Image (cartoon, rainbow, N blue to C red):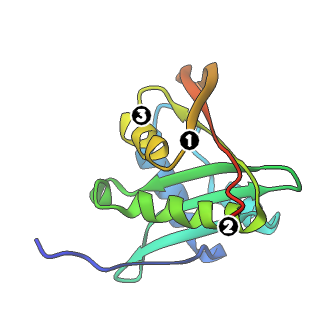
Amino acid sequence: MSARTVTTAPLRHEDAARCAEIERELFPGDDPWSEQAFRSELDNGNFYVGAYSDGQLIGYAGLGLNDFESSVHTLAVDEDFQGGGVGKTLLRALLAKADEAGLPVFLEVRTDNVPAINLYLAHGFEHLGMRRRYYQPSGADAYTMGRPANRD
Protein backbone atom coordinates (compact mmCIF):
# COMPACT_ATOMS: atom_id res chain seq x y z
CA MET A 1 0.00 0.00 0.00
CA SER A 2 1.36 3.45 -0.87
CA ALA A 3 1.70 6.18 1.70
CA ARG A 4 -1.35 8.38 2.02
CA THR A 5 -0.97 12.14 2.15
CA VAL A 6 -2.49 13.60 5.29
CA THR A 7 -3.14 17.31 5.79
CA THR A 8 -4.46 19.24 8.77
CA ALA A 9 -6.79 22.20 8.88
CA PRO A 10 -9.24 23.79 11.32
CA LEU A 11 -12.20 21.50 11.92
CA ARG A 12 -15.38 22.69 10.20
CA HIS A 13 -19.04 22.42 11.17
CA GLU A 14 -19.61 20.21 8.14
CA ASP A 15 -17.13 17.71 9.69
CA ALA A 16 -19.34 17.15 12.74
CA ALA A 17 -21.24 14.18 11.27
CA ARG A 18 -17.99 12.40 10.35
CA CYS A 19 -16.57 13.13 13.82
CA ALA A 20 -19.63 11.52 15.38
CA GLU A 21 -19.21 8.51 13.07
CA ILE A 22 -15.58 8.05 14.14
CA GLU A 23 -16.66 8.41 17.79
CA ARG A 24 -19.23 5.61 17.42
CA GLU A 25 -16.63 3.34 15.80
CA LEU A 26 -13.91 3.98 18.39
CA PHE A 27 -15.91 4.29 21.60
CA PRO A 28 -18.88 1.91 21.33
CA GLY A 29 -18.79 0.91 25.01
CA ASP A 30 -18.92 4.47 26.24
CA ASP A 31 -20.97 7.54 25.45
CA PRO A 32 -19.63 8.75 22.08
CA TRP A 33 -20.03 12.42 21.27
CA SER A 34 -22.89 13.33 18.96
CA GLU A 35 -22.78 15.52 15.89
CA GLN A 36 -24.39 18.27 17.98
CA ALA A 37 -21.70 17.94 20.66
CA PHE A 38 -19.02 18.68 18.06
CA ARG A 39 -20.99 21.62 16.70
CA SER A 40 -21.32 23.00 20.23
CA GLU A 41 -17.58 22.63 20.82
CA LEU A 42 -16.89 24.63 17.67
CA ASP A 43 -19.55 27.23 18.52
CA ASN A 44 -18.03 27.72 21.98
CA GLY A 45 -14.72 28.86 20.50
CA ASN A 46 -12.65 25.83 21.39
CA PHE A 47 -9.64 25.05 19.19
CA TYR A 48 -10.27 22.04 16.92
CA VAL A 49 -8.13 20.64 14.15
CA GLY A 50 -8.96 17.94 11.63
CA ALA A 51 -6.74 15.51 9.75
CA TYR A 52 -7.75 14.80 6.16
CA SER A 53 -6.74 12.22 3.56
CA ASP A 54 -8.05 12.58 0.03
CA GLY A 55 -10.50 15.18 1.31
CA GLN A 56 -12.01 12.86 3.94
CA LEU A 57 -11.80 13.55 7.66
CA ILE A 58 -9.74 10.77 9.28
CA GLY A 59 -9.06 12.29 12.70
CA TYR A 60 -9.69 15.26 14.92
CA ALA A 61 -8.51 16.83 18.13
CA GLY A 62 -9.85 19.58 20.35
CA LEU A 63 -8.46 21.85 23.02
CA GLY A 64 -10.26 24.09 25.47
CA LEU A 65 -8.35 27.11 26.76
CA ASN A 66 -8.93 29.62 29.52
CA ASP A 67 -6.69 32.20 31.19
CA PHE A 68 -4.93 29.62 33.37
CA GLU A 69 -4.81 26.25 31.61
CA SER A 70 -5.79 24.23 28.59
CA SER A 71 -7.45 20.84 28.37
CA VAL A 72 -7.47 18.25 25.61
CA HIS A 73 -11.17 17.62 25.06
CA THR A 74 -10.75 14.85 22.51
CA LEU A 75 -8.30 13.25 20.11
CA ALA A 76 -9.33 10.44 17.79
CA VAL A 77 -8.06 8.82 14.60
CA ASP A 78 -10.00 6.51 12.29
CA GLU A 79 -8.86 2.93 12.94
CA ASP A 80 -7.67 2.55 9.33
CA PHE A 81 -5.17 5.38 9.89
CA GLN A 82 -3.94 4.58 13.41
CA GLY A 83 -0.25 3.94 13.90
CA GLY A 84 0.79 6.22 11.04
CA GLY A 85 1.54 9.41 12.96
CA VAL A 86 -1.84 11.11 12.53
CA GLY A 87 -2.45 11.25 16.28
CA LYS A 88 1.01 12.70 16.85
CA THR A 89 0.36 15.39 14.24
CA LEU A 90 -2.97 16.31 15.83
CA LEU A 91 -1.50 16.38 19.34
CA ARG A 92 1.35 18.61 18.19
CA ALA A 93 -1.18 21.07 16.74
CA LEU A 94 -2.94 21.25 20.12
CA LEU A 95 0.32 21.65 22.00
CA ALA A 96 1.45 24.44 19.67
CA LYS A 97 -1.78 26.31 20.43
CA ALA A 98 -1.30 25.85 24.20
CA ASP A 99 2.36 26.87 23.94
CA GLU A 100 1.38 29.98 21.99
CA ALA A 101 -0.80 30.95 24.95
CA GLY A 102 1.83 29.86 27.52
CA LEU A 103 -0.58 27.42 29.19
CA PRO A 104 -0.15 24.02 30.82
CA VAL A 105 -2.14 21.19 29.22
CA PHE A 106 -4.25 18.59 31.03
CA LEU A 107 -6.13 15.53 29.78
CA GLU A 108 -7.79 12.27 30.71
CA VAL A 109 -6.99 9.00 28.94
CA ARG A 110 -8.30 5.48 29.45
CA THR A 111 -5.88 3.45 31.54
CA ASP A 112 -6.00 0.66 28.94
CA ASN A 113 -5.18 2.94 25.98
CA VAL A 114 -1.45 2.21 25.95
CA PRO A 115 -0.71 3.76 22.52
CA ALA A 116 -2.28 7.07 23.58
CA ILE A 117 -0.55 7.03 26.97
CA ASN A 118 2.80 6.45 25.27
CA LEU A 119 2.09 9.30 22.83
CA TYR A 120 1.36 11.67 25.70
CA LEU A 121 4.42 10.57 27.70
CA ALA A 122 6.61 11.14 24.62
CA HIS A 123 5.30 14.72 24.45
CA GLY A 124 6.12 15.69 28.02
CA PHE A 125 2.98 14.65 29.87
CA GLU A 126 3.18 13.08 33.31
CA HIS A 127 0.69 10.98 35.26
CA LEU A 128 -1.07 13.15 37.83
CA GLY A 129 -3.73 10.81 39.16
CA MET A 130 -6.59 8.51 38.31
CA ARG A 131 -10.32 9.01 37.90
CA ARG A 132 -12.13 5.81 38.78
CA ARG A 133 -15.05 4.85 36.52
CA TYR A 134 -14.54 8.08 34.51
CA TYR A 135 -15.83 6.73 31.21
CA GLN A 136 -19.51 5.84 31.15
CA PRO A 137 -21.34 3.60 30.73
CA SER A 138 -18.36 1.21 30.56
CA GLY A 139 -16.97 2.33 33.91
CA ALA A 140 -13.41 2.40 32.55
CA ASP A 141 -10.84 4.27 34.60
CA ALA A 142 -8.86 7.24 33.29
CA TYR A 143 -5.46 8.63 34.10
CA THR A 144 -5.22 12.36 34.47
CA MET A 145 -2.08 13.64 32.83
CA GLY A 146 -0.50 17.05 32.58
CA ARG A 147 2.22 18.91 30.76
CA PRO A 148 3.68 22.16 32.11
CA ALA A 149 3.42 25.39 30.18
CA ASN A 150 6.09 25.77 27.51
CA ARG A 151 6.85 29.47 27.45
CA ASP A 152 9.81 29.30 25.06
Residue receiving disc 3 = 113
Q: Which mark is residue 125?
A: 1
The mark closer to the camera, 2 or 3, is 2
Residue at the (72%, 61%) spot, across then down? 151
Q: Amino acid at mark 3?
A: Asn
Q: Is residue 114 left or right of residue 70?
A: left
**Could you tell which of marks 1 and 3 lies nearer the N-terminus?**
3
Horizontal and vertical percent position of residue 62: 63, 59
Q: Marks 1 and 3, how far apart in space?
A: 15 Å
For image coordinates 48% across by 26% down, the residue present is 111
Please name the residue shown 41% across and 34% down the image.
Answer: 113
Horizontal and vertical percent for residue 24?
48, 47
What kind of residue is marked 1?
Phe
**Of marks 2 and 3, which one's residue comes earlier in the chain?**
2
Is residue 31 visible in the rendered structure shown here? yes
Q: CA distance from mark 1 to mark 2?
A: 16 Å
Which quadrant is the N terminus positioned in?
A: bottom left
Above or below, 54 against 121 in this view is below
Q: Nearer the viewer, residue 33 or 62?
A: 62
What amino acid is found at the position of numbered circle 2 in the picture?
Lys
Residue behind mark 2: 97
Say which quadrant the C terminus sits in.
Answer: bottom right
Q: Is residue 19 above or below residue 15?
A: above
Q: Is residue 31 left or right of residue 46?
A: left
Residue at the image point whose x is 63% and y is 52% from the top:
34
Assess disc 1: are there few (<14), some (14-19) or many (≥20) residues with their C-alpha within 10 Å of its C-alpha: many
Residue furthest to the left in view is 1
x, y percent for residue 67: 89, 56
Q: Please report whichever mark, 1 or 2, sits nearer to the chain's N-terminal start.
A: 2
Residue 73 in the figure: left or right of residue 116: right
